Amino acid sequence: MNFFFFLDSLNKDLSSSVEVFNRPASERLCKDVIKTKNIIAFYSDGKKWISKRLDTLQPFESKLILKKDLPREMLDESVFICLSDKTDINKDSLMDEKYMNSSPSWRANTKIYSNFCSSSYQGEYPYTMAAKKVSLVSCSPMLQKGKNINSYFYLINLKKKPEKNFFKVNVMNSNKDILKILKFKTNHVNFYDMNEILKEHDHLMYIFNSEEEGGIPIYFSNKENKYFSLEHTHPPTEYTFEGNRHYFQKKKKSFWSS
């Protein structure tokens, strides 16, 4: 089972949306029976999951959900989306309904848009990540800087349990110097304005590292709300073709954590 998310912003001229699909990326490789599902939006209040059924999704149908159209009580929250047989979710713990565990992964289209343009990200938050302890090593040369360009780092974190806990993320350069320590939250769409670091430090690459928690890292650059760049980095296992992928993931993470 996969979960999806909205990319929030403090910029009032930007909005976000999620387009959900009730069909696999490849029908030939999907063994599930495609059936009608409820579209459930949910967030954590720190003690329990608060959910709301938004709509139904027929087999092979897709629907666009705008963050601004969510119920009023959800507009200022970090909201996640799932497709479920139920009309709400368990208040104490997320459950895996084991639907559409396909290859390639079953994803949604997450978009940031303004009156002038938009940029989207094809992604998902797998239940397997929410159900276990994860860490973070994200190396990205994709942050942009220049006149009137604002760049941001997102880290989407989702846990099986609804508790909200703080954790630290180190922003480092290629020499392992810690440039900034960020304080993020679990079950939250965390984001950080990178402009201060980009002005003070001239590096080709920045490394985001946390031994406490992890999530989905995404990089967003915006010039005057008219030109966008929305990128993500793959998990370390994706950099290795065949072989013992998890061995190399462990080596990479231990290098940046040492």
Image (tube, rainbow, N blue to C red):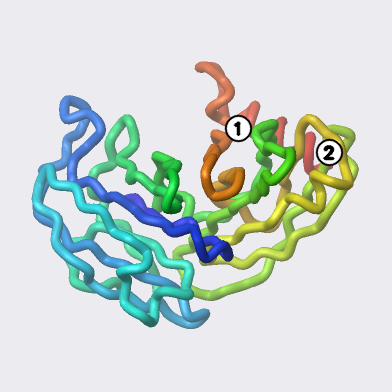
Q: Amino acid at mark 1?
A: Pro
Q: Residue at x 19, y 48 (%)?
A: 62
Q: Position of residue 4 (x, y in %)?
A: 38, 54
Q: Position of residue 212 (x, y in %)?
A: 69, 57
Residues marked 2 and 1 touching at CB (< 8 Å):
no
Placement of the C terminus among the 4 image quadrants: top right
Q: Residue at x 76, y 38 (%)?
A: 206
Q: Which residue is mark 1?
A: 236
Q: Count neighbours of disc 1 (C-alpha within 10 A) and say few if under 14, some if 14 to 19, many if 20 or more.
A: some
Q: Position of residue 255 (x, y in %)?
A: 79, 34
Mark 2 → mark 1, Cα distance in angstroms: 18 Å
Q: Amino acid at mark 2?
A: Asn
Q: Position of residue 233 (x, y in %)?
A: 57, 35
Q: Residue at x 33, y 63 (%)?
A: 95
Q: Residue at x 44, y 59 (%)?
A: 15
- Say the numbered circle drawn on residue 173: 2
